Amino acid sequence: MIKFTECLNDTWDYFFLTDPANLLQFKKEHNLSDDLMGEFTTNDSAELAIQEGIMIPMSNIKNQPYTVFFNTNGQTSIFKKDTNLLLFEKTGYILNVINNEVCLITVPYLKNWTENNGIYRLKEAVKAGVRQKITLENGYYAITILGGFTYQDNIEEATFEFQCKQVLTVETKSSVLDIGFPFLIE
């Protein structure tokens, strides 16, 4: 399991899980503007991106530090420990990885999503440790999102766990019906 601490939402109430290269390709294929946040809030491109496994939006992210786990090898969930409190478990998400990486990003990056701005800034933020990135083999993944509280160094922390399980079919589509689910941990 891969662990990140002090993950912040950049004062916006969203996180997005995506392969940055796939999101850029999606933008180009659908002739979307560089302001993906504007596109996602004014037309159906966000719903299409979710259904195609391009991104997973997470709304109602409270402005607080989070501990984030990426469970990529089927390990027992961090929430199975007796001292931890699971508040929600959301299944049915699909994520398509085309560039061997998955990042947890925030709204400011999507406001100017280009190779030179959004992706370059994201790479620099990953190097600085303020954005989270993992390496995954290319392919489609079923994503389960768990949220709640875990004890980290004897301190209760708001926590997300992303369980990533590779699936074989490219015909896989997201089966999430409630794309506006509030991922609120408080």
Image (tube, rainbow, N blue to C red):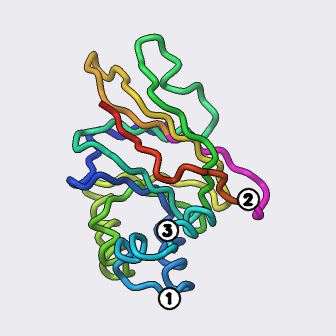
The first of marks 1 and 3 along the sequence is 1
Q: Mark 1 Cα within 10 Å, few/some/many (few <14, many 20+)?
A: few
- Could you say which is closer to the camera, residue 62 or residue 156? 62
Q: Position of residue 146 (x, y in %)?
A: 49, 35
Report whether 165 appears left or right of 33: right
SS at circle 1: loop
Mark 1 highlights which residue? 31
- Could you say which is closer to the camera, residue 136 or residue 54? 54
Mark 2 highlights which residue? 172
Q: CA distance from mark 1 to mark 2?
A: 24 Å
The answer to whether the residue labelled 1 contacts the one labelled 3, judged by CB atoms less than 8 Å apart, is: no
Q: Position of residue 92 (x, y in %)?
A: 64, 47
Give the magenta-colored segment's residue range.
Answer: 162-172
Write the residue at 64% across / 34% down: 74
Q: CA distance from mark 1 to mark 3?
A: 13 Å
Q: Is residue 149 magenta?
A: no
Q: Residue at the far bottom: name it.
A: 31
Quarter the C terminus occupies:
top left
- Could you say which is closer to the camera, residue 140 or residue 52? 52
Mark 3 highlights which residue? 46
Disc 1 vs disc 3: which is toward the camera?
A: 3
In the rendered view, would you say 140 is above or below 110? above
In the rendered view, would you say 31 is above or below 103? below
Report whether 83 appears left or right of 45: left
Write the residue at 54% across / 66% down: 47
Write the residue at 42% across / 51% down: 58
- Tag on residue 84? none
Q: Mark 2 Cα within 10 Å, few/some/many (few <14, many 20+)?
A: some
The first of marks 1 and 2 along the sequence is 1
Query: Could you tell me the amino acid type at mark 1?
Result: Asn
Query: Could you tell me the amino acid type at mark 3?
Result: Ala
